[in-house]
Image: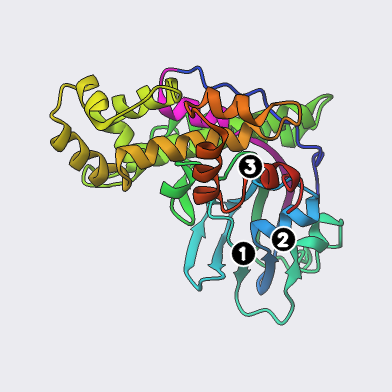
Amino acid sequence: MHKTTLSFSKRVSTLESSDALSQILNSIGISGSLLLKEEYCSPWAVSVPDSREINSLLNLSKGMRVATFHMVERGHVRLKLETNNDYLIEAGEIAVCFSGLGHVLYQGESDIVTPFQDIMAGAENVFKPDKIKNKPSTSLVCGVFLLHDAVLNPLLSTLPQVLKLKVSDPNEFPSLYGVIHQITQEFKYQTVGSSYVIERYLEILCAETIRAHTETLPEQATGWLSALKDPMIGKAIEAIHLDPKFDWTVKELASKVSMSPSRFAARFVSSVGDSPMIYVTKWRMFIACRELKNDQANIIDIANNLGYESLASFSRAFKRHIGVSPGMWRTSKNKV
């Protein structure tokens, strides 16, 4: 078993990019680590807890989501979510659990299930293939993406529970294929600085899996990612993101894309799933959660910077969408 560091570094994030997907990828603060590259001989099983439990294991802050990924180099593996949904992951494919749901990786029917916690602690691989018997084995590369600002993030609500992609064909997703190749090369040679470089590549890997998924969405698909591909709704979303303080109305947003307010509102709801004004509020609350991480930031200033004329109106909106007051959120932000 080989490991990189588990000291996840927070990336600098901004909201200044002009396209909404880049804004979200910046704002979510992706970091990552490669936990293992291992071989397993059937039958075997490894249990992976949900994001909340992994947060506790790694002592991560509230509002962070852990998305595990599993890439099959050789053989195949089945991934069964705690919801009982079952997926086959074959050689040359990667599966990313952006949902943060607990799951079991397995092949065959094993009487032993190794907990993820034991793998993190460096326990011996009891399913390691016997070279003398020369039985077929499965080779896996597994790791985690840490999504630092997950609360009310519109991207995460639109991703599938398990995002599965083929990564072995350079012609299908060239950028994704390229970053996978760089990671495997760095992992193979383990030269000075490899740990740092692999972690940076993992950030790109997370972004590339999302971009590749976006490319595969059918024209009739709905949800936030699909809405970005709509020239009218995508432009409106970008306008909201670039100026959340503005006193947006349906009429104002509709004028941005040269549509009537009624047609725009109906198209927005159909594409995004929320009304324009609810989306504006959710985006403001997403930013508020990020800003409240800074203990030096004044809550009244945060409210004013998001277009609220009073602390009371800001607090009501925050509690309606987050469930607690801004002050309570700040106090508990480091609690899982």
Query: Which of the labelled discs sits on residue 53, or is there none?
Result: 2
Pinpoint residue 196: horizontal percent, then vertical percent: 77, 28
Residue on which disc 3 sits: 326
Q: Are marks 2 and 3 in contact (CB under 8 Å)?
A: no
Pinpoint residue 228: horizontal percent, then vertical percent: 33, 32
* Mark 2 closeness class: few <14, some 14–19, many ≥20 residues within 10 Å: some
Vertical relation: 92 (above or below) 287:
below
* Magenta run includes residue 30: yes
* Mark 1 closeness class: few <14, some 14–19, many ≥20 residues within 10 Å: some
* Magenta run includes residue 279: no
Name the residue rendered at 56%, 45% in the picture. Answer: 151
Which label's residue is closer to the chain start, 1 or 2? 2
219 left or right of 197 in image: left
Pinpoint residue 189: horizontal percent, then vertical percent: 77, 32
Q: Please, what is the three-letter code of the amino acid marked with disc 1?
A: Gly
241 left or right of 301 in image: left
Which label's residue is closer to the chain start, 2 or 3? 2
Nearest to the observer: residue 319 or residue 44: 319
In the figure, residue 188 lies in which quadrant?
A: top right
Q: Which residues are magenta?
A: 18-37
* Disc number lying in front (3 or 1): 3
Badge 3 element: helix
Which label's residue is closer to the chain start, 3 or 1? 1
Q: Are marks 1 and 2 in contact (CB under 8 Å)?
A: yes
